[in-house]
Image (spheres, rainbow, N blue to C red):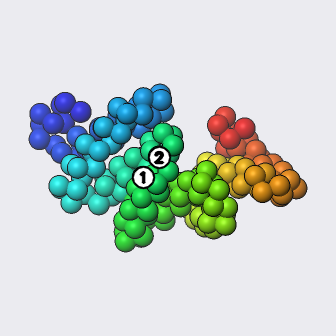
Amino acid sequence: RRAAAQAGDRTAEAAALRMLGAADAARGRLRQATRHLEQALALCREDGDRIGEARALGTLGLADYCQGRYQQSARSHRQALAIYLELGDHAGEARELHGLGLVDLRRGRYEQAAGHLRRSLVLFRDAGMRSGEAHVLGHLGELELQQGRYLQAVAHLRRSLRVGREIGSRLSQ
């Protein structure tokens, strides 16, 4: 990050801050992740970097989600989704719909969660993003479990496991 800042490469600096934020979030350092992501977001907005802005917002939404700040998470995911829709980026759209689906699931808004997750699943499949497909299937299984629909839950979870095994993903197994 420092090298990019010293070189005046704001795009690289924002990308480095975004990656630092994602790494911090993965390590459970959520306040630090939020700080890095907000800095990345500010740089992207100042420079008019819409894709960088969307990526920072999406990762910020994830960090907020992990902290139980669901309203902020949903706001970030919606803002990122709007940018991805504007840019015609279906992979980004799928990720943000998935994020919104998770927020709705945690808030007990099952109908909205199902809509977001199903649309996300279609987009991940259309884009050939098998890892995203596996994760969404797992969350659809969780949604069905929470609603007491055990047969549907098992079907989704088995499909998630199958896709995860096919792609060699340990996370979805």
Q: Is residue 71 left or right of residue 33?
A: right
* Image spot of residue 19 (x, y percent): 36, 38
Residue at 33% over, 42% down: 37
Residue 69 shows which numbered tag? 2
* Image spot of residue 48 (x, y percent): 21, 60
Residue at 18% over, 45% down: 10
Residue at 67% over, 34% down: 170
Residue 144 in view of the camera: yes
Q: Are marks 1 and 2 in contact (CB under 8 Å)?
A: yes
Which quadrant of the view contains residue 34? top left
Residue position for label 1:
72
Q: Residues within 10 Å of mark 1 (few under 14, many from 20)?
A: some
Residue at 37% over, 33% down: 31
Q: Is residue 71 above or below residue 166?
A: below
- Dot 2 amino acid type: Arg
Which SS class for mark 2?
Answer: loop
Q: Is residue 99 left or right of residue 164?
A: left
